[in-house]
Amino acid sequence: RAPKVRGGFGEQLLESLLGNVLPSSDSELQHSFAGGEKVDAAIRLPGGLVPVDAKFPLENFRRILAAQGEDELRRARKSFRDDVRRHAGNIASRYIRPAEGTLDLALMYVPAENIYYEAFVLGEGRLESDDLWQGVISERVFPVSPNTFSLYLATLHMGLRGMRVEEGARRIVAELAALKGELQGFRESFDLLARHLTNAAKNREEARGRLERFGWRLGHAESGGTPPPQESRE
């Protein structure tokens, strides 16, 4: 019943849900903002952080459970819906901070399915429940129950894995493109070296032939013989 103890228990449930679905690198508990405010959790996405608040107001929900008669039940339900609206506004004003790296939305963690059902399914009627839902969403705050939050997290986890695979594939393609460029440069250098080596071998053979002819002529000159005619250099 004590709000502080209840809040701590809600945060433990939230921590358990996050730890069971997301890697620790994709979420952070008690994320701090510049002004010193702390949100119960933040989910890391490529575009920014998604704040998650777990401090849900339950006092008037207990009044609903204990209500005696239709009038008391109606008043308790109205007070409970007002609490939920105020809570959504507080979450939006305190934790949606794009300038500090959050996305333009936040999650409101409702700690039990029956509370979520009362707020957004049952209420005093379908229209009033829809109005409460739309009012909360208009603050860019999305309510999640333990079950729906698990589904959200599983979807986020699959999306994060897909983005990591896609990012890894982009890096591999970039590396291959870089290697292809380096290979082309090496091929050009190799071709140039091969041409130089071919020319060097050709020049070596020409020099050897000239040296042999020079030695033959020199031998003939020393022996008094007639030297052979010089080859044309055309």
Image: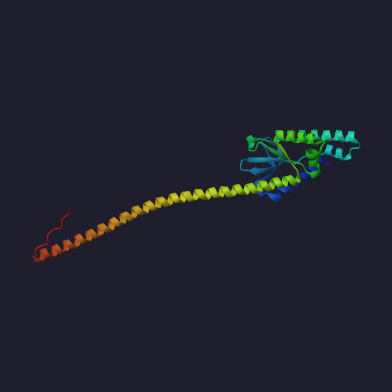
Residue drawn 41% across the image and 51% down it: 184
How are the residues colored?
rainbow
Where does residue 215 sit, x and y in percent of width and height?
Answer: 16, 63
Residue drawn 37% across the image and 54% down it: 190
Q: Is residue 124 left or right of residue 88?
A: right
* Residue nearest the viewer, comparing 122 with 44: 122
Where does residue 163 sit, x and y in percent of width and height?
Answer: 60, 47
Quarter of the image containing the N terminus? top right
Where does residue 30 sit, x and y in percent of width and height?
Answer: 71, 42
Using the image, determine if residue 158 lies above or below residue 223. above
Residue drawn 62% across the image and 49% down it: 161
Residue 60 in view here: yes
Using the image, determine if residue 210 lies above or below residue 22. below
Residue 112 in view here: no
* Residue nearest the viewer, comparing 193 with 135: 135
Q: How many marks?
A: 0
Q: Is residue 90 left or right of residue 225?
A: right
Q: Is residue 78 left or right of residue 187?
A: right
Examine the image and state in which quarter residue 112 appears.
top right
Q: Is residue 33 left or right of residue 74?
A: left
Q: Residue furthest bottom?
A: 223
Where does residue 186 sit, x and y in percent of width and height?
Answer: 40, 52
* Residue nearest the viewer, comparing 205 with 157: 157
* Residue nearest the viewer, comparing 65 with 35: 65
Q: Residue furthest front?
A: 126
